Image (tube, helix red, strand yellow):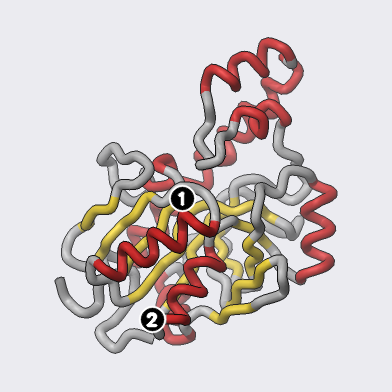
Amino acid sequence: MNAAVAGLIVALPEECRSLTSRGTRRGDCFALGDARLVCVAGVGRDNAARAAHQLMERGARGLVSWGCAAALSPALRPGDMCLPAEIVDTHARRWPVSEAWHRRARHALEGAGEVCAATLLTTDRPVATAAHKRALATRTGAVAADMESAAVAAVAHEHDLPFLTVRAIADPAEVSLPRAAMRALDAAGTVRRITLFGEVLRHPGELGALLRLASQFRTALRALARSADRMGPGMQLDEGGA
Protein backbone atom coordinates (compact mmCIF):
# COMPACT_ATOMS: atom_id res chain seq x y z
CA MET A 1 0.00 0.00 0.00
CA ASN A 2 1.13 3.53 -0.70
CA ALA A 3 1.86 6.17 1.93
CA ALA A 4 -1.45 7.95 1.31
CA VAL A 5 -3.78 5.15 2.42
CA ALA A 6 -6.71 6.46 4.47
CA GLY A 7 -8.14 4.48 7.38
CA LEU A 8 -11.89 4.84 7.87
CA ILE A 9 -13.46 4.06 11.25
CA VAL A 10 -17.15 3.17 10.84
CA ALA A 11 -19.26 2.30 13.88
CA LEU A 12 -22.00 0.19 12.32
CA PRO A 13 -22.20 -2.33 9.46
CA GLU A 14 -25.25 -0.42 8.20
CA GLU A 15 -23.13 2.74 7.87
CA CYS A 16 -20.49 0.74 6.03
CA ARG A 17 -23.00 0.15 3.24
CA SER A 18 -22.29 3.72 2.16
CA LEU A 19 -18.77 2.57 1.23
CA THR A 20 -19.21 -0.94 -0.11
CA SER A 21 -21.93 -3.39 -1.13
CA ARG A 22 -20.13 -6.25 0.57
CA GLY A 23 -21.67 -7.59 3.74
CA THR A 24 -19.82 -6.57 6.89
CA ARG A 25 -20.09 -7.13 10.61
CA ARG A 26 -18.60 -5.55 13.68
CA GLY A 27 -14.85 -6.20 13.94
CA ASP A 28 -14.25 -6.49 10.21
CA CYS A 29 -11.15 -4.68 8.92
CA PHE A 30 -10.51 -4.76 5.19
CA ALA A 31 -9.04 -2.89 2.23
CA LEU A 32 -11.13 -1.09 -0.37
CA GLY A 33 -8.72 -0.79 -3.26
CA ASP A 34 -5.18 0.46 -2.70
CA ALA A 35 -5.98 3.75 -0.95
CA ARG A 36 -8.57 2.89 1.72
CA LEU A 37 -8.74 0.66 4.77
CA VAL A 38 -12.04 0.28 6.61
CA CYS A 39 -12.70 -0.96 10.13
CA VAL A 40 -16.23 -1.62 11.42
CA ALA A 41 -15.60 -0.65 15.02
CA GLY A 42 -18.86 -0.76 16.95
CA VAL A 43 -20.29 2.23 18.78
CA GLY A 44 -18.38 4.42 21.22
CA ARG A 45 -14.98 5.83 22.03
CA ASP A 46 -13.22 2.66 23.17
CA ASN A 47 -14.22 0.76 20.05
CA ALA A 48 -13.24 3.69 17.82
CA ALA A 49 -9.82 4.05 19.47
CA ARG A 50 -9.10 0.32 19.07
CA ALA A 51 -10.10 0.47 15.42
CA ALA A 52 -7.89 3.51 14.83
CA HIS A 53 -4.87 1.69 16.25
CA GLN A 54 -5.68 -1.39 14.19
CA LEU A 55 -5.84 0.67 11.00
CA MET A 56 -2.53 2.35 11.83
CA GLU A 57 -0.91 -1.06 12.31
CA ARG A 58 -2.20 -2.09 8.89
CA GLY A 59 -0.65 0.95 7.22
CA ALA A 60 -3.16 3.81 7.39
CA ARG A 61 -1.47 7.21 7.09
CA GLY A 62 -4.58 9.27 7.83
CA LEU A 63 -7.72 8.55 9.86
CA VAL A 64 -11.35 9.32 8.99
CA SER A 65 -14.30 9.09 11.39
CA TRP A 66 -17.11 8.14 8.99
CA GLY A 67 -20.81 7.67 9.53
CA CYS A 68 -24.01 9.34 10.76
CA ALA A 69 -24.63 12.02 13.37
CA ALA A 70 -27.49 13.58 15.29
CA ALA A 71 -28.28 17.22 14.58
CA LEU A 72 -28.00 19.64 17.49
CA SER A 73 -28.72 22.67 15.31
CA PRO A 74 -32.26 23.00 13.90
CA ALA A 75 -30.71 24.27 10.67
CA LEU A 76 -29.42 20.78 9.83
CA ARG A 77 -31.74 18.29 8.16
CA PRO A 78 -31.45 14.56 7.42
CA GLY A 79 -28.95 14.02 4.62
CA ASP A 80 -27.00 17.24 5.25
CA MET A 81 -23.25 16.64 5.47
CA CYS A 82 -21.17 17.64 8.48
CA LEU A 83 -17.49 18.17 7.72
CA PRO A 84 -16.38 19.80 10.98
CA ALA A 85 -13.22 21.83 11.33
CA GLU A 86 -13.10 20.96 15.04
CA ILE A 87 -14.19 18.16 17.38
CA VAL A 88 -15.14 18.80 21.01
CA ASP A 89 -16.07 16.32 23.74
CA THR A 90 -18.23 16.64 26.84
CA HIS A 91 -15.12 17.45 28.92
CA ALA A 92 -14.47 20.52 26.71
CA ARG A 93 -11.38 18.97 25.10
CA ARG A 94 -10.97 20.08 21.50
CA TRP A 95 -9.17 18.70 18.46
CA PRO A 96 -8.84 20.48 15.11
CA VAL A 97 -9.07 18.37 11.99
CA SER A 98 -6.27 18.52 9.41
CA GLU A 99 -6.64 21.89 7.71
CA ALA A 100 -5.36 20.98 4.25
CA TRP A 101 -7.25 17.67 4.14
CA HIS A 102 -10.41 19.43 5.30
CA ARG A 103 -10.03 22.03 2.56
CA ARG A 104 -9.63 19.36 -0.14
CA ALA A 105 -12.57 17.34 1.17
CA ARG A 106 -14.83 20.37 1.34
CA HIS A 107 -13.93 21.29 -2.23
CA ALA A 108 -14.73 17.73 -3.34
CA LEU A 109 -18.17 17.93 -1.74
CA GLU A 110 -19.13 21.28 -3.28
CA GLY A 111 -22.39 21.00 -5.16
CA ALA A 112 -23.45 17.81 -3.33
CA GLY A 113 -25.94 19.56 -1.03
CA GLU A 114 -25.54 21.26 2.32
CA VAL A 115 -22.10 20.86 3.92
CA CYS A 116 -21.56 22.26 7.42
CA ALA A 117 -18.05 22.90 8.74
CA ALA A 118 -19.02 23.92 12.29
CA THR A 119 -17.99 22.04 15.45
CA LEU A 120 -19.07 18.46 16.08
CA LEU A 121 -19.52 17.06 19.59
CA THR A 122 -18.62 13.53 20.69
CA THR A 123 -20.76 12.18 23.53
CA ASP A 124 -20.52 9.07 25.71
CA ARG A 125 -24.08 7.91 25.02
CA PRO A 126 -26.76 8.55 22.42
CA VAL A 127 -28.42 11.97 22.49
CA ALA A 128 -31.96 10.70 22.77
CA THR A 129 -34.20 13.72 23.33
CA ALA A 130 -34.78 17.08 21.69
CA ALA A 131 -34.28 18.79 25.06
CA HIS A 132 -30.87 17.16 25.51
CA LYS A 133 -29.87 18.21 22.00
CA ARG A 134 -30.78 21.84 22.75
CA ALA A 135 -28.85 21.76 26.03
CA LEU A 136 -25.73 20.34 24.39
CA ALA A 137 -25.86 22.88 21.57
CA THR A 138 -26.09 25.73 24.08
CA ARG A 139 -23.31 24.37 26.31
CA THR A 140 -20.79 23.37 23.62
CA GLY A 141 -21.60 25.41 20.51
CA ALA A 142 -21.61 22.20 18.46
CA VAL A 143 -24.09 21.68 15.62
CA ALA A 144 -24.11 17.86 15.57
CA ALA A 145 -23.12 14.91 17.74
CA ASP A 146 -21.62 11.46 17.35
CA MET A 147 -19.98 8.95 19.71
CA GLU A 148 -16.62 8.22 18.04
CA SER A 149 -14.87 11.19 16.44
CA ALA A 150 -13.11 12.54 19.55
CA ALA A 151 -11.49 9.15 20.16
CA VAL A 152 -10.25 8.95 16.57
CA ALA A 153 -9.01 12.54 16.76
CA ALA A 154 -7.11 11.83 19.97
CA VAL A 155 -5.33 8.82 18.44
CA ALA A 156 -4.48 10.76 15.29
CA HIS A 157 -3.06 13.70 17.21
CA GLU A 158 -1.09 11.41 19.51
CA HIS A 159 0.59 9.79 16.51
CA ASP A 160 0.86 12.95 14.40
CA LEU A 161 -1.43 11.65 11.67
CA PRO A 162 -3.86 13.72 9.62
CA PHE A 163 -7.48 13.36 10.72
CA LEU A 164 -10.91 14.10 9.25
CA THR A 165 -14.54 13.57 10.24
CA VAL A 166 -17.24 13.03 7.61
CA ARG A 167 -20.77 12.68 9.00
CA ALA A 168 -24.26 12.74 7.51
CA ILE A 169 -27.16 13.96 9.62
CA ALA A 170 -29.74 11.29 10.47
CA ASP A 171 -32.11 12.56 13.17
CA PRO A 172 -32.90 16.31 13.25
CA ALA A 173 -32.57 18.45 16.36
CA GLU A 174 -36.27 18.69 17.15
CA VAL A 175 -36.78 14.91 17.10
CA SER A 176 -36.49 12.66 20.16
CA LEU A 177 -35.53 9.07 19.46
CA PRO A 178 -38.35 6.57 20.04
CA ARG A 179 -38.05 4.83 23.39
CA ALA A 180 -38.54 1.48 21.66
CA ALA A 181 -35.41 2.07 19.59
CA MET A 182 -33.35 3.07 22.61
CA ARG A 183 -34.44 0.01 24.59
CA ALA A 184 -33.58 -2.27 21.67
CA LEU A 185 -29.98 -1.04 21.31
CA ASP A 186 -27.21 -3.16 22.78
CA ALA A 187 -23.85 -1.85 24.01
CA ALA A 188 -22.33 -2.13 20.52
CA GLY A 189 -25.11 -0.05 18.95
CA THR A 190 -26.79 -3.05 17.31
CA VAL A 191 -30.58 -3.13 17.24
CA ARG A 192 -31.85 -6.31 18.89
CA ARG A 193 -34.72 -7.12 16.55
CA ILE A 194 -36.63 -9.36 18.94
CA THR A 195 -36.49 -6.67 21.63
CA LEU A 196 -37.59 -4.01 19.15
CA PHE A 197 -40.51 -6.17 17.99
CA GLY A 198 -41.59 -6.70 21.59
CA GLU A 199 -41.38 -2.97 22.32
CA VAL A 200 -43.54 -2.16 19.29
CA LEU A 201 -46.13 -4.69 20.40
CA ARG A 202 -46.24 -3.07 23.85
CA HIS A 203 -46.15 0.50 22.49
CA PRO A 204 -47.71 0.46 18.98
CA GLY A 205 -47.96 4.23 19.00
CA GLU A 206 -44.20 4.42 18.47
CA LEU A 207 -44.30 2.59 15.14
CA GLY A 208 -44.70 5.80 13.12
CA ALA A 209 -41.68 7.41 14.82
CA LEU A 210 -39.60 4.27 14.19
CA LEU A 211 -40.49 4.27 10.50
CA ARG A 212 -39.56 7.96 10.21
CA LEU A 213 -36.24 7.30 11.97
CA ALA A 214 -35.49 4.45 9.55
CA SER A 215 -36.28 6.72 6.59
CA GLN A 216 -34.00 9.46 7.96
CA PHE A 217 -31.20 6.95 8.44
CA ARG A 218 -31.54 5.79 4.83
CA THR A 219 -31.39 9.43 3.69
CA ALA A 220 -28.16 9.88 5.65
CA LEU A 221 -26.65 6.72 4.13
CA ARG A 222 -27.42 7.94 0.61
CA ALA A 223 -25.69 11.24 1.40
CA LEU A 224 -22.65 9.37 2.73
CA ALA A 225 -22.50 7.22 -0.40
CA ARG A 226 -22.59 10.32 -2.63
CA SER A 227 -19.84 11.88 -0.52
CA ALA A 228 -17.68 8.78 -0.81
CA ASP A 229 -18.03 8.90 -4.60
CA ARG A 230 -17.08 12.58 -4.71
CA MET A 231 -14.10 12.21 -2.38
CA GLY A 232 -12.71 9.36 -4.44
CA PRO A 233 -10.69 6.25 -3.56
CA GLY A 234 -8.14 8.11 -1.44
CA MET A 235 -10.70 10.25 0.40
CA GLN A 236 -8.68 13.36 -0.63
CA LEU A 237 -5.70 12.31 1.54
CA ASP A 238 -2.65 13.20 -0.51
CA GLU A 239 0.93 11.99 -0.32
CA GLY A 240 1.93 14.90 1.88
CA GLY A 241 -0.39 13.97 4.79
CA ALA A 242 -1.77 17.00 6.66
Depicted 105 relative to depicted 36: above or below: below
Q: What label sits on residue 21 in the rendered view?
A: none
Query: Mark 2 — residue?
Result: 161
In the rendered view, does 166 fall on the left or right side of 73? left
In the rendered view, does 137 fall on the left or right side of 119? right
| Residue at the top extreme, as displayed | 201
Classify mark 2: residues with Cα within 10 Å, few (<14), some (14-19) or many (20+).
some
Q: Position of residue 206 (x, y in %)?
A: 72, 22
Q: Which residue is drawn at the image coordinates 45% and 73% (left, top)?
A: 155
Query: Mark 1 — residue?
Result: 11
Give the image quarter of residue 123: bottom right
227 or 85: which is nearer to us? 85
Say what secondary structure mark 2 lies in.
Answer: loop
Q: Which residue is drawn at the image coordinates 72% and 12% (left, top)?
A: 202
Considering only order in the chain, which callout, 1 or 2, is on the residue closer to the N terminus? Answer: 1
Depicted 123 relative to depicted 64: above or below: above
- Of the residues shown, which amino acid type is indicated by label 2? Leu
Q: Which residue is drawn at the image coordinates 30% and 47% (left, top)?
A: 28
Q: Which residue is drawn at the image coordinates 29% and 88% (left, top)?
A: 240
Q: Position of residue 80 (x, y in %)?
A: 58, 56
- Distance from disc 2 to disc 1, alpha carbons, whole Å, reads 20 Å
- Of the residues shown, which amino acid type is indicated by label 1? Ala
2 or 54: which is nearer to us? 54
Depicted 69 relative to depicted 142: above or below: above
Q: Is the N terminus in the top left, top right, bottom left or bottom right quadrant? A: bottom left
Q: Position of residue 159 (x, y in %)?
A: 40, 81
Please indicate, yes or no, whether residue 222 appears anywhere in the rendered image.
no
Q: Is the C terminus in the top left, top right, bottom left or bottom right quadrant? A: bottom left
Classify mark 1: residues with Cα within 10 Å, few (<14), some (14-19) or many (20+).
many
